[in-house]
Image: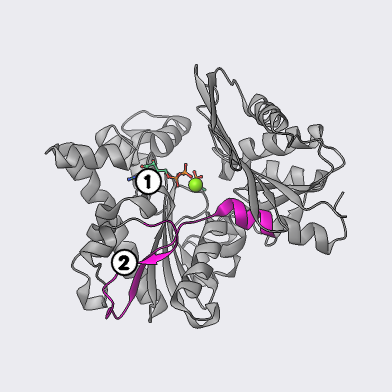
């Protein structure tokens, strides 16, 4: 029988999230995470299906070591990378530029293109590449598939994708808005249609993916028509450590008057801005604790975060014209009731409201948090980038008759 398992690797700048899935029934055979890679004490957490989690702390100096540690953990459960049941390895790749609009089997040319895109995804693409190269070394015979964050956004019209700068200069440097978190926006918008009991072609949705990185998208009938991230994952919403939107002249000012280099400003805007720059914390749980304790800096950081979010809800309402649902997803969106409540507060005129009890309640799956008679649904839909990547990876290797 053909192999049916897919290992999914989501390599971030300092972490690797992974899942081993059996595509026959959709079982998660193992899930895990290596975090704080490159720091003194990294942490690995591995949970086999139906078993106890195992945790381990120690130095994991780089992504290659991280992946080898993951392979060793999987092997302890008899799920090692040498298993003949493994059909493919699916990789999240953050930047696919304009070339990659679909999941793609990775060969040397694909690797070279992902490498060429490093300058526009400096936090992400290098980690993705190391993940791919290490996985290839461990199983050279297996198809490795890249699933791109940018793919879902390639349907954006030119009016949304282009910046209003000189066209020749923009084209010469491939400057345009690409958008990210697309696998999540695609999955969540589809699941929202299912929650509403309607076909994806019939619904217009605003998706708010609020994790450490955060982005909003406007999805009309299943196709993305606008999104808040741009050339790189820096534009748009206020994030854990990234500024999101700002006047580009801030950068010239910091160079000319502040004496900072381009690299220093890059680090400032990507790693020392957003919530952490505003109040010293990037974890929304800690920020809410501080707000509840009367901390003014945390309050201001929260208010700035919410103000930006509200502006994007309004903007995408206008872009879509008719909105059927506003959907919250990812770590903050799924868990922070206070963020959802504040983001739609005062938007009753747009038909948006949350029901206090439903919003404060917990639940595992997709759920509505708006009042039953609401004109526009407000929903929480847990994202599942790993399952989506596995599904796309498996479909591609089956279609190309390529399972090992
Ligand atoms: N119970 C919670 N309440 C509020 N925020 C939460 C909660 N759980 C997680 N978060 C937030 O989710 C963030 C991580 O989200 P996640 O989607 O996992 O991000 P990423 O994939 O970018 O690492 C954390 O920084 C934290 O702020
Ligand atoms: C593209 C991006 O911002 O990803 P993440 O949220 O994983 O950092
Ligand atoms: Mg994420």
Quadrant of the rendered structure where residue 104 is?
Answer: bottom right
SS at badge 1: loop
Residue 100 or residue 132, whichever sits in front? 132
Q: Does 377 lie within the magenta span?
A: yes
Quadrant of the rendered structure where residue 155 is?
Answer: bottom right
The x, y position of residue 21, in whole percent, is 67, 49
Residue 91 or residue 321, whichever sits in front? 91
Residue that mark 2 sits on:
369
Say if disc 1 is inside 8 Å of ligand 2.
Answer: yes
Let me know if residue 99 appears in the view.
no
Give the tally of numbered discs: 2
Seen in the image, is 187 located left or right of residue 335?
right
Residue that mark 1 sits on:
239
Quadrant of the rendered structure where residue 353 is?
Answer: bottom left
Between the residue at mark 1 and the residue at mark 2, the CA separation in whole angstroms equals 23 Å
What residue appears at the point 50 percent right and 63 percent down from the top-left corner? Answer: 188
What residue appears at the point 33 percent right and 42 percent down from the top-left corner? Answer: 274
SS at badge 2: loop
What residue appears at the point 72 percent right and 49 percent down from the top-left corner? Answer: 6
The x, y position of residue 192, in whole percent, is 47, 70
The x, y position of residue 219, in whole percent, is 48, 71
Give the mark nearest the N terminus, 1 or 2. Answer: 1
Scheme of colours in the image: one colour
Placement of the N terminus among the 4 image quadrants: bottom right
Q: Does 24 lie within the magenta span?
A: no
Seen in the image, is 356 located left or right of residue 173?
left
Let me know if residue 167 appears in the view.
yes
Range of residues picked out in magenta: 363-391
Seen in the image, is 178 located left or right of residue 110?
left
Mark 1 or mark 2: which is in front?
2
């Amino acid at each position: 029988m053909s192999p049916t398992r897919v290992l999914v690797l989501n390599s971030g700048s300092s972490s690797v999230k992974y899942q081993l899935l059996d595509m026959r029934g959709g079982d998660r055979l193992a899930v895990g995470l290596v975090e704080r890679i490159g720091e003194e004490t990294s942490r690995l957490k591995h949970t086999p299906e139906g078993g106890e989690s195992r945790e381990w702390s120690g130095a994991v100096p780089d992504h290659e070591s991280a992946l080898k540690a993951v392979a060793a953990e999987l092997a302890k459960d008899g799920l090692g990378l040498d298993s003949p049941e493994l059909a493919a390895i699916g990789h999240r790749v953050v930047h696919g530029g304009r070339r990659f609009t679909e999941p793609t089997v990775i060969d040397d040319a694909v690797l070279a293109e992902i490498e060429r895109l490093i300058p526009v995804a400096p936090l992400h693409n290098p980690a993705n590449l190391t993940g791919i190269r290490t996985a290839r070394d461990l199983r050279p015979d297996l198809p490795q598939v890249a699933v791109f964050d940018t793919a879902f956004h390639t349907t954006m019209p030119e009016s949304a994708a282009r910046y209003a700068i000189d066209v020749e200069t923009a084209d010469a440097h491939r400057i345009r808005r690409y958008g990210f978190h697309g696998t999540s926006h695609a999955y969540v918008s589809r699941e929202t249609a299912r929650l509403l009991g309607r076909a994806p072609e019939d619904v217009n949705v605003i998706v708010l993916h609020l994790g450490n990185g955060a982005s909003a998208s406007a999805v009309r009938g299943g196709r993305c028509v606008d999104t808040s991230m741009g050339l790189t994952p820096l534009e748009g919403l206020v994030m854990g450590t990234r500024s999101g939107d700002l006047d580009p002249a801030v950068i010239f000012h910091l160079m000319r008057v502040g004496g900072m280099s381009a690299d220093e400003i890059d680090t400032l805007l990507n790693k020392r801005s957003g919530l952490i720059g505003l109040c010293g914390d990037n974890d929304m749980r800690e920020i809410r604790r501080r707000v509840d304790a009367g901390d003014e800096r945390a309050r201001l950081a929260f208010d700035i975060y919410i103000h930006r979010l509200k502006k994007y809800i309004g903007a995408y309402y206008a872009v879509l014209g008719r909105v059927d649902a506003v959907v919250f997803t990812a770590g903050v969106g799924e868990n922070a009731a206070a963020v959802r409540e504040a983001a739609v507060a005062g938007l009753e005129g747009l038909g948006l409201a949350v029901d206090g009890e439903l919003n404060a309640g917990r639940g595992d799956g997709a759920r509505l948090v708006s009042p039953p008679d609401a004109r526009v649904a407000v929903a929480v839909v847990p994202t599942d980038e790993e399952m989506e990547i596995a599904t796309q990876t498996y479909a591609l290797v089956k279609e190309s008759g390529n399972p090992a």
